[in-house]
Image (tube, coloured by chain):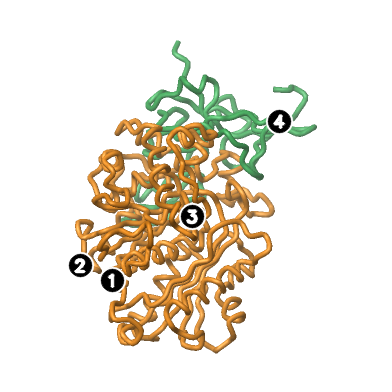
């Protein structure tokens, strides 16, 4: 394996775009990433692309539609479908293309369009053999219900309060106000978050990421190519992907399942724990080396929990870390300097690429008012459903 | 419930019906000892020696509430519920078989719900039309005698 550089990143702003197709969003991000890298479209030698929520045949062929718009050049294009881990998988696929030497310049691109509100089942015939039908029709379990049930267990065990859950949103909104690609740039007060409508108790509206449209692109290259374009390339030191290890009782990330193993929660067996461990091992770096972290905050509970799983604090200490300001920009280990999914919105096939873009800007010193001083190593936890997670380490 | 309407499961194959004491229909692996619900979602221990020995079983009717939430917004179809929408409690219940099952919690005030409380399986209406009441499984706190 050889070292891989992040040569260019591009983002379409998150939001709701009725007049744009998901292909438009992906092409926008691709063009921006090419410009950022100083490359032409014809320099791209391989593509890994993803779309998830949009679905259908069109949604299964995002890479080919984006490439067709850019101009067909005959390059290999892999479309990946891995639910919320779709962009993490596209990134890893492009990483492997470069790391294993099958090409020198590869594009990972993901774009998506989502409905407002809860992401519904797409089964047409309400088949009793489709577990996603069963969980809606027989149980009535939207995704945030899974987060909320796990969050309530955390409250029981660690004394987490609604104030803690709200504080994550307040902190991330302070970060996100400076992110030009975020959907929500308003700074929220504790009072506003705690006054927002209850969705799935204890999670209130402003504690849950909003389903959104978006597009992201990351161009990876060999170090040889990167050095021709920059004197200080950002390296993708690992692009891990992991699934749950048997024995994990974490249920929050398990939609559409409706039964889960009992037992104490062993973080090392969760998909995120496995992915983070693998990313640290591959990069030779650990949580103590990190200058900033992006975490998949599908809800504010996620950020607290994930802080512990990826090892920036011990179990049960995430609230203290937050209250002390350690996870704010200027603190010991800033979390979600982009504003997180909380500010950006959640465009499933885009998230991981947005996180890598944010950390890349941070490591280059291009993050403007949200810049983390002297950032050299960053980490992203790339979320997925049913026990599926990516984890990447970036460094300069 | 309306006595003139037929009472039928909203989806077949998840609980015994008709029954005075309905139970969830799960499955177990005679090799690795794991229990599964519903019966077609199988998750073996990776050290399982033989994945052919899966049998249908009825799961325990009683368990303990592990954690819960209250859903304040109406989910999209195929969820259906009587109008107007009323918030409902969704719980995860731990069974002696070593698995936790999701289901709505009924028959008590929401503020009375506590982790560890004893609950039992019941079958209740989820929605209805002119002819039928459509049923699903729920959990209800065990009434102390």
> Residue under circle 1?
A237
How far apart are the two marked residues, 3 and 2, measured between alpha carbons?
Answer: 30 Å
- Confirm or deny contact between disc 1 and disc 2 (CB under 8 A): yes
Return the disc, 3 or 1, that comes first in the chain's sequence: 1
Q: Residue A163: x percent and y percent? A: 38, 33
In the rendered image of the structure, the colour used to display chain A is: orange
Return the disc, 3 or 2, that comes first in the chain's sequence: 2
Name the element at disc 2.
Answer: loop
> Residue under circle 4?
B83
Residue B8 appears in the rendering: yes
How far apart are the two marked residues, 3 and 4, measured between alpha carbons?
Answer: 34 Å
| Chain letter, green in picture | B
Q: Quadrant of the N terminus of chain B?
A: top right
Q: Are marks 1 and 4 on the same chain?
A: no
Provide the chain ID for the residue under circle 4: B
How far apart are the two marked residues, 1 and 2, measured between alpha carbons?
Answer: 9 Å
Could you tell whether A287 is left or right of A183 in the image?
left
Could you tell whether A69 is left or right of A175 in the image?
right
Q: Quadrant of the C terminus of chain B?
A: top left
């Amino acid at each position: 394996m050889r070292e891989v550089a992040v040569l260019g990143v591009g983002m379409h702003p998150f939001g709701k775009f009725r007049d744009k197709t998901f292909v438009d969003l992906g092409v926008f991000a691709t063009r921006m990433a090419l410009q950022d890298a100083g490359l032409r479209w014809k320099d791209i030698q391989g593509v890994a692309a993803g779309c998830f929520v949009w679905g259908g045949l069109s949604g299964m062929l995002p890479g080919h539609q984006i490439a067709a718009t850019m101009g067909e050049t005959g390059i290999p294009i892999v479309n990946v479908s891995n639910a919320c881990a779709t962009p993490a998988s596209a990134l890893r696929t492009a990483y492997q293309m470069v790391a294993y030497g099958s090409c020198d310049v590869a594009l990972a691109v993901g774009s998506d369009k989502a409905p407002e509100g809860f992401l519904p089942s797409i089964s047409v015939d309400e088949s009793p053999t489709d577990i996603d039908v069963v969980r809606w029709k027989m149980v009535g379990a939207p995704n945030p219900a899974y987060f909320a049930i796990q969050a309530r267990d955390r409250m029981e065990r660690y004394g987490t309060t609604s104030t803690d859950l709200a504080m994550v949103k307040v902190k991330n909104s302070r970060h996100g106000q400076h992110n030009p690609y975020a959907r929500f740039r308003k700074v929220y007060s504790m009072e506003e978050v705690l006054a927002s409508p209850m969705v799935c108790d204890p999670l209130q509206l402003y504690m849950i990421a909003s389903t959104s449209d978006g597009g992201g692109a990351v161009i990876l290259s060999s170090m040889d190519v990167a050095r021709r374009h920059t004197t200080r390339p950002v390296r993708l030191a690992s692009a891990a992907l992991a699934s749950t290890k048997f024995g994990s009782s974490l249920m929050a990330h398990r939609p559409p399942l409706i039964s889960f193993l009992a037992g104490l929660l062993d973080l090392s067996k969760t998909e995120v724990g496995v992915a983070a461990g693998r990313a640290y091992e591959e990069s030779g770096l650990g949580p103590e080396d990190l200058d900033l972290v992006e975490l998949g905050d599908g809800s504010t509970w996620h950020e607290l929990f994930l802080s512990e799983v990826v090892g920036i604090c011990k179990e049960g200490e995430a609230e203290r870390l937050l209250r002390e300001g350690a996870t704010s920009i200027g603190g010991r280990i800033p979390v979600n300097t982009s504003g997180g999914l909380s500010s950006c919105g959640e465009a499933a096939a885009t998230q991981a690429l947005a996180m890598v873009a944010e950390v890349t800007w941070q490591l280059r010193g291009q993050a403007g008012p949200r810049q983390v001083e002297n950032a050299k190593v960053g980490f992203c936890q790339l979320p997925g459903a049913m026990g599926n997670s990516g984890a990447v380490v970036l460094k300069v | 419930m309306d006595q003139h309407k037929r009472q039928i499961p909203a989806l077949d194959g998840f609980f015994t019906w008709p029954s005075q004491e309905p139970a969830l229909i799960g499955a177990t692996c005679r090799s690795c000892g794991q229990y599964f619900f519903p019966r077609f979602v199988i998750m073996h221990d990776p050290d399982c020696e033989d994945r052919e020995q899966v049998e249908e079983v009825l799961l325990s009717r009683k368990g303990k509430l592990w954690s819960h939430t209250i859903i304040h917004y109406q989910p999209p179809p195929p969820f259906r519920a009587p109008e107007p929408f009323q918030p409902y409690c969704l719980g995860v219940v731990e069974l002696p078989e070593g698995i936790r099952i999701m289901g709505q919690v009924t028959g008590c005030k929401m503020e009375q719900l506590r982790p560890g409380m004893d609950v039992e399986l019941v079958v209740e209406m989820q929605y209805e039309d002119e002819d039928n009441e459509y049923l699903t499984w729920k959990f209800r706190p065990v009434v102390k005698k």
